[in-house]
Image (tube, rainbow, N blue to C red):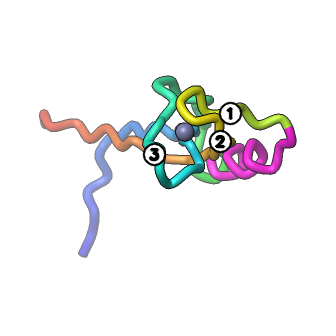
């Protein structure tokens, strides 16, 4: 099966979540936008290894960073 190569613009972002399971806080803003998935993953790891992690404004637990991608598929031909 061949995939039609359409102009898809993907956005790779790093977001901050509360690391506590009892808390559902997610930082409303993206931490950073990366150029590709590898970069966003590496940046998320870098932030997670940082000693100066921000704490959750809701419960005070440390924040955790995750990379995620947003694929914006054009729905018009
Ligand atoms: Zn929290």
Q: Cα distance, mark 3 to mark 2?
A: 25 Å
Magenta highlight range: 40-51
Find numbered disc 1 in the image and state the secondary structure of the residue it sits on.
loop
Answer with the quadrant where ligand 1 appears in the image.
Answer: top right
Relative placement, left or right, of 31 versus 24 is right
Mark 2 or mark 1: which comes first in sequence?
1
In this view, the residue in front, 11 or 27, is 27
* Residue at image point 47% right, 44% down: 23
Relative placement, left or right, of 9 versus 4 is right
Disc 2 and disc 1 in contact, CB within 8 angstroms: yes
Residue 18 at what x, y percent from top left?
56, 42
Mark 3 or mark 2: which comes first in sequence?
2
Residue picked out by circle 1: 55
The answer to which quarter of the image holds residue 33 is top right
The magenta stretch spans residue 47: yes
Residue 15 shows in the view: no
Residue picked out by circle 2: 61
Disc 3 and disc 2 in contact, CB within 8 angstroms: no
Residue 66 at what x, y percent from top left?
57, 48
């Amino acid at each position: 099966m061949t995939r039609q190569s359409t102009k898809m613009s993907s956005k790779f972002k790093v977001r901050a979540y509360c690391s506590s399971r009892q808390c559902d806080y997610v930082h409303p803003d993206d931490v950073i936008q990366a150029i590709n998935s590898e970069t966003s993953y590496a940046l998320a790891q870098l932030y997670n290894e940082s000693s100066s992690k921000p704490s959750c404004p809701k419960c005070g637990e440390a924040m955790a960073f995750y990379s995620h991608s947003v694929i914006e598929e054009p729905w018009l031909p």
